[in-house]
Image: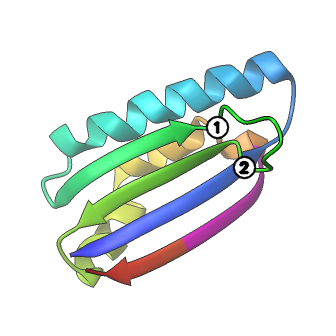
Amino acid sequence: MVNHIVMFRLEGDAVAVARAALGFKEAIEALVFTIPFLVEASVGINSNPAEKWTLALTSKVESWEALAAYATHPDHLKAVAVIKPLIAERACVDFES
């Protein structure tokens, strides 16, 4: 299994950021029903204003090849488009378990 963890810091109008974060969460979490090799996916929206990151995505796929396919899957790209204009920073860690 490959674990894919991504954190995003979004910038912009607070209402737009909150709406985008929620829309991204809903879109990503729905992908487990449309992308067969996506084993798990969840998004946590940060509640602690003292922290810099707006949200964190955690997902699991079956293999490194599946991760590459997930990254370019049209449904995944559609989900990312929800937050893309607001992304100020991104950090990612991928590891096997």
Left or right, residue 54 beside residue 35: right
Left or right, residue 96 beside residue 90: left
Gap between marks 2 and 1 measured at Cα: 7 Å
Q: Quadrant of the C terminus?
A: bottom left
Q: Pointers 2 and 1 in contact (CB under 8 A)? A: yes
Which residue bears the numbered disc 1? 46
Tell me, yes or no, if residue 71 can be seen here: yes
Instruction: List x then y, in percent, for residue 28.
Output: 39, 40
Instruction: List x then y, in percent, for residue 84.
Output: 67, 45
Tell me, yes or no, if residue 34 can be seen here: no
**Could you say which disc has been placed on residue 28 in the image?**
none
Asked if residue 88 is among those painted magenta in the image, a careful observer would answer yes
Snapshot colouring: rainbow
Secondary structure state at the residue bearing disc 1? loop
Question: What type is the residue that disc 2 sits on?
Answer: Trp
Magenta residues, start to end: 87-92
Give whichever of 87, 78 is nearer the camera: 87
In the rendered image of this protein, does residue 42 appear above or below residue 25?
below
Asked if residue 11 is among those painted magenta in the image, a careful observer would answer no
Image label count:
2
Left or right, residue 37 beside residue 54: left
Label 2 Cα neighbours within 10 Å, binned few <14 / some 14-19 / many ≥20? some
Q: Quadrant of residue 73?
A: bottom left
Q: Residue at x 64, y 20 (%)?
A: 19
Q: Quadrant of the N terminus?
A: bottom left
Secondary structure state at the residue bearing disc 2? loop
Which residue bears the numbered disc 2? 53
In the rendered image of this protein, does residue 57 appear above or below residue 47?
below
Question: What type is the residue that disc 1 sits on?
Answer: Asn
In the rendered image of this protein, does residue 6 appear above or below residue 44?
below
Give whichever of 61, 35 is nearer the camera: 61
